[in-house]
Image (tube, helix red, strand yellow):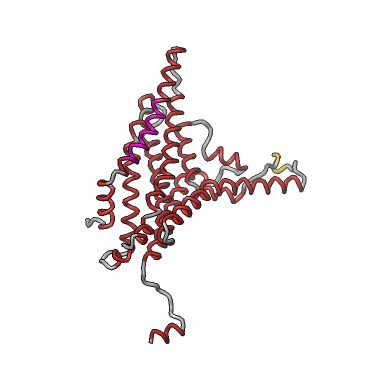
């Protein structure tokens, strides 16, 4: 299989640069420091009470997984937001387009380079996260689901960074737009549900409030706005983490919090549906990124432009 030339070049640059080892060191240093501090607190509790609280290891696993998720959400866009716009600023994008490289190869090569860094970070972080396997509480299937969630968030954040990098000529503007849209996906969909619940509460208070429906007190509900959370990577991660924790959280608790009934195929397969939709969103963003990089404009010439061309 022929290797992507852009990916090959980016991989060589990353290996020869000190930036990648520094990112890996800081990334794993933070995770290891949190894990060691947690282990120190557990051992201090053992010395004080001569008992081990195994829930502490599950809390450590949840904390490390959440911390890694947040860092990936911030690191991956930083790696891709300047991928295309940086080539424009260095005036090398036009040179790349004069070669046999296609716009699709340029975009896919940049994305593969960012994803390879993400894979390196995730794989190198397995030792501190896998410490919980020694004491039980999760299985390899739980780790596989967590890894799939990381891949989905990396693809969404990476494709979004490449899209805005292809649209805008400045890396700073592309980075701002990337983090802004990611913030809308994570926080905006949540507050949209809260706003829908506030409207529902106002409607109930205006038309009687204590209305009984099917023998139960009617409560505010987010309604159809709840399905916006399917595009929220944080909601997907929250649901995945519910599996090993068995703490009553996850999709069922989100339904209760938003006043939505837990029924239907989408609710029962929330993680699968959410990941598929996020991968579809990534595909759409990459498609338009390729169109923005492509210098050939497939637009019809206006009459005055046709006369000029003739």
In the depicted structure, whether residue 231 falls above or below residue 133: below
Identify the image quadrant of residue 26.
top left
In the depicted structure, whether residue 28 falls above or below residue 176: above
Pick the front one: 264 or 307: 307
Residue ID at (39%, 33%): 31
Residue ID at (26%, 54%): 9
Quarter in which the N terminus is drawn:
bottom left
* Left or right for 162, reference 249: left
Question: Residue 184: image x %, image y %?
Answer: 53, 50
Question: Residue 309: image x %, image y %?
Answer: 39, 84
Question: Residue 199: image x %, image y %?
Answer: 68, 49
Magenta span contains residue 212 = no
Magenta span contains residue 26 = yes
Pick the front one: 278 or 297: 297
Q: Is residue 20 visible?
A: yes
Pick the front one: 158 or 139: 158
Residue that extends furthest to the left in the rendered view of this protein: 1
Would you say the magenta stretch is mainly helix, strand or loop? helix
Residue ID at (62%, 45%): 194
Q: Which residues are magenta?
A: 22-36
Residue that extends furthest to the front in the rendered view of this protein: 90
Question: Residue 100: image x %, image y %?
Answer: 25, 66
Residue ID at (37%, 60%): 89
In the depicted structure, whether residue 210 falls above or below residue 128: below
Quarter in which the C terminus is drawn:
bottom left
């Amino acid at each position: 299989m022929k290797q992507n030339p852009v990916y090959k070049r980016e991989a060589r640059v990353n290996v020869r640069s000190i930036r990648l080892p520094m990112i890996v060191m800081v990334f794993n240093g933070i995770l290891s420091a949190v894990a060691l501090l947690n282990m120190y607190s557990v051992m201090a509790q053992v010395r004080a009470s001569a008992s081990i609280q195994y829930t502490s290891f599950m809390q450590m696993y949840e904390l490390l997984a959440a911390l890694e998720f947040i860092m990936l959400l911030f690191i991956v866009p930083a790696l891709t937001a300047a991928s295309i716009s940086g080539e424009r600023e260095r005036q090398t994008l036009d040179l790349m387009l004069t070669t046999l490289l296609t716009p699709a190869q340029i975009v896919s090569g940049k994305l593969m380079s960012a994803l390879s860094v993400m894979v390196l970070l995730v794989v190198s972080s397995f030792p501190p996260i896998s410490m919980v396997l020694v004491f039980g509480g999760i299985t390899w299937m739980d780790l596989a689901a967590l890894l799939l969630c990381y891949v989905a968030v990396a693809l969404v954040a990476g494709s979004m960074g490449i899209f805005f990098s292809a649209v805008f000529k400045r890396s700073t503007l592309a980075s701002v737009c990337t983090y802004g849209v990611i913030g809308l996906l994570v926080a905006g969909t949540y507050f949209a549900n809260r706003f829908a619940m506030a409207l529902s509460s106002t409607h109930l208070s205006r038309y009687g409030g204590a209305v009984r429906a099917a023998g139960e007190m009617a409560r505010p509900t987010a309604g159809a706005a709840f399905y916006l959370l399917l595009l929220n990577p944080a909601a997907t991660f929250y649901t995945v983490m519910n599996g090993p924790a068995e703490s009553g959280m996850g999709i069922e608790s989100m339904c209760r919090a938003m006043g939505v009934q837990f029924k239907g195929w989408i609710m029962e397969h929330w993680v699968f549906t959410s990941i598929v939709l996020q991968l579809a969103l990534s595909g759409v963003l990459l498609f338009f990124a390729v169109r923005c990089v492509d210098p050939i404009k497939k637009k019809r010439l206006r009459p005055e432009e046709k006369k000029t061309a003739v």
